[in-house]
Image (tube, helix red, strand yellow):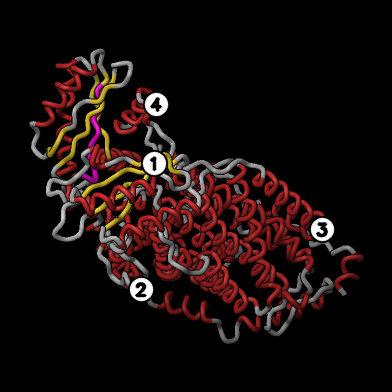
Amino acid sequence: MATFLYKLGRLAFRRRGLMVILWVLIFGAVGVAASSAPPPPADTFSMPGTESQKAFDLLKEKFPAADATGASARVVVRAPQGSKISDSGPKAEVTKLLGDLAKAPEVVGATDPYQTRTISEDGTTAYAVVTYKVPGPEVSDEAHDAFGKITDKARTGGLTVEAGGDAVQIEVAAGGSAEGIGILISAIVLLITFGSVIAAGMPLLTAVVGIGIGISGITALGLSTTTTTLAMMLGLAVGIDYALFILSRYRSEMMEGRDREEAAGRAVGTAGSAVVFAGLTVIIALAGLAVVNVPMLTTMGLAASGTVAVAVLIAITLVPALIGFAPVKVMRRHDRGAFRAKPLSERRQRKAAKRAAKEAGGKPNLSTRWAGYVLRHPVGVLLVGVLSLGAMAIPAADLELGLPGEGTMAPDTTQRKAYDLLSDSFGPGFNGPLMITVEAKDAKAAGDAVGKALAKEDGVDTVSPAAVNEAGDTAIINVVPTTGPTDGRTEDLVRSLRALAGDLESQTGGEVLVTGQTALFIDFSKTLDDALLPYLALVVGLAFLLLLLVFRSVLVPLKAALGFLLSVSAALGAVVAVFQWGWLKDVFGIDQPSPIMSTMPIFMIGVVFGLAMDYEVFLVSRMREAYVHGARPHEAVATGFRYSGRVVAAAAVIMISVFSGFILDVNDMVKMIGFALATAVLFDAFIVRMAIVPALFALLGKTAWWLPRWLDALLPNVDVEGEKLNQVAPRPAPARERQLVD
């Protein structure tokens, strides 16, 4: 591996113009494909194999007219205090409101609550449904503005008017671009690390090119816009980090007196090998989300993994090419012994080596001093690290899962106000009705019999008459529970109705299915629970084998996986404390604490595992390199930190800043993902990898690198540490290139 990447790095450096042109052509081709692609489809949610999905598919087949693609808005109106909605004054205002809405842009029509009898028992509140010609994502700004002006005008007449549904625009708070904030902080960190604007801009440029190709590819494939958020988040973070590691290794190789082309080749051969294997762990973790069998998660995982793959390819090809264009002084350190453009003679190489050894033996850098402290106090550092992460993980024991909806939106939004008005006037179960489908030869008779049986169940408020399709073979029954959709008693009711369905099927001769918001959540939770163990086995198993190949050790991959469990548990505890309990909610801009999204635990496991293995590979690969070249275990740890500690810390800060930028996003799911990934990287990079890992190495000594002989004989040697590169005779750069550099 190292030899192949070494040759690739030299080729990219030597043919840098051709390499840049190649990536420009790729960028342009993907951009053209994206620009000519049709608009992305609306986001859909499905769970193949579940009862809820089976019921939805049945409805789509048997009631095609009801499977409308147009958006809808449920407008809730309440009469002024002391009045009834049917009084002449409020009724005239409601009639005018609905008449204006029916004439609004893109509106098909609006129901009349006085004819549909959608009025509360106390007579104060009513609701109407406004339907549109186009799906929610395609409703124009003109239509949104018209809707807002009409409802605002109705409020001036004394009515309380609120609305929910996918046709209602979600208010977006003013703020900067999430990715823009992450790039700005990353630029500052890179500038401090390299001390040069051009050198700092190189990782940013390559990362932007990577996410540009990745996002354009997603658009060209016609995937939904939701998939782009994770791809952009991860693509930007790993793109900067991977380029940072290549550039840092290039600087180290130049400090040892090597020619620029030789240094570029060795940087790609060593750090590039770590980048490739680190990228593979991320790709495995993301692509493994397909095991969950939820199409939305599968698409997000595959799209993000594709973007990460692009970042890896750019790091090992475009980065060395750009290094070739950079002036020599741009890539120099501020240390004594700056880079030289020409190959050094043997005598000058020995002097450079002696000077580097002398400087290394002088005042150690911060990373080396920290490694020395950990090596002297491994037990104390290990206990503090494990106990602190364990304490952070305690809130995770109170984890409550749920699906986002209008009931979890901020209290001051019109969607949440409409939700609360309906719950108050029509009962808590009104916002989460259950839908029962009955498929039978005589659907009318079977539906009526099922409806009578359901009405006798505890927890059922109302049961609608059975609505039969034109073929007469399928009926729909709406059941309104006495409790809300997120109430545990509603979940018990769903389970009770599904248990009753078996008896009803034998009595009516038809198939009875239960769906609805609460039923959907139950099925979704079961799907995730069933997929968790297979997913963990697949991802952790493949990553373990990959790390076994990289480090040729049994204990190193094992402790890497255990460290991941600590960091992901602590990060999940932080998510619960902030988003569910409401700790520091004002600091993070959380309007309404609510249950954690059902997808978050398994999503965090996948993404955080991949990122955790990134830092494990980058830090421990340098230790492995030193150990293979004859260093003792403690010396190998110190060497790894001396050369990689600062770079890993900078990379972690960059990744944290990129993820933290998304905390400012108005979308609750994006905000939660950004916070979860930022805290996970913080815990994993600075506590697990920078503290617990070296402490364990100090305690294990040579045992850390133990590998049974029979297994050592079976495993192929991928040579991540670049041992075989020492057997490659350095080739001088072409004379023409040296003249250009001079």
In front of the other: label 3 or label 1?
1
Residue type highlighted by circle 2: Val
Q: CA distance from mark 3 to mark 4?
A: 57 Å
Name which residue lies at 25% across and 56% down: 399
Residue 434 lies in the magenta stretch: yes
Q: Earlier in the sequence, mark 3 or mark 2?
A: 3
Residue type highlighted by circle 1: Thr
In front of the other: label 4 or label 1?
1
Label 2 neighbour load within 10 Å: few <14, some 14-19, many 20+:
few
Which residue range is magenta in the image?
430-438
Q: Quadrant of residue 414?
A: bottom left
Report the residue that reaches farthest toward the top. Answer: 441
Image coordinates of residue 463 in percent, x first then y, are 16, 33
Residue beneath label 3, please? 17
Residue beneath label 4, please? 64
In front of the other: label 3 or label 2?
2
Residue type highlighted by circle 3: Gly
Q: Earlier in the sequence, mark 2 or mark 4?
A: 4
Q: Earlier in the sequence, mark 3 or mark 1?
A: 3
Residue beneath label 2, please? 587
Q: Earlier in the sequence, mark 2 or mark 1?
A: 1
In front of the other: label 2 or label 4?
4
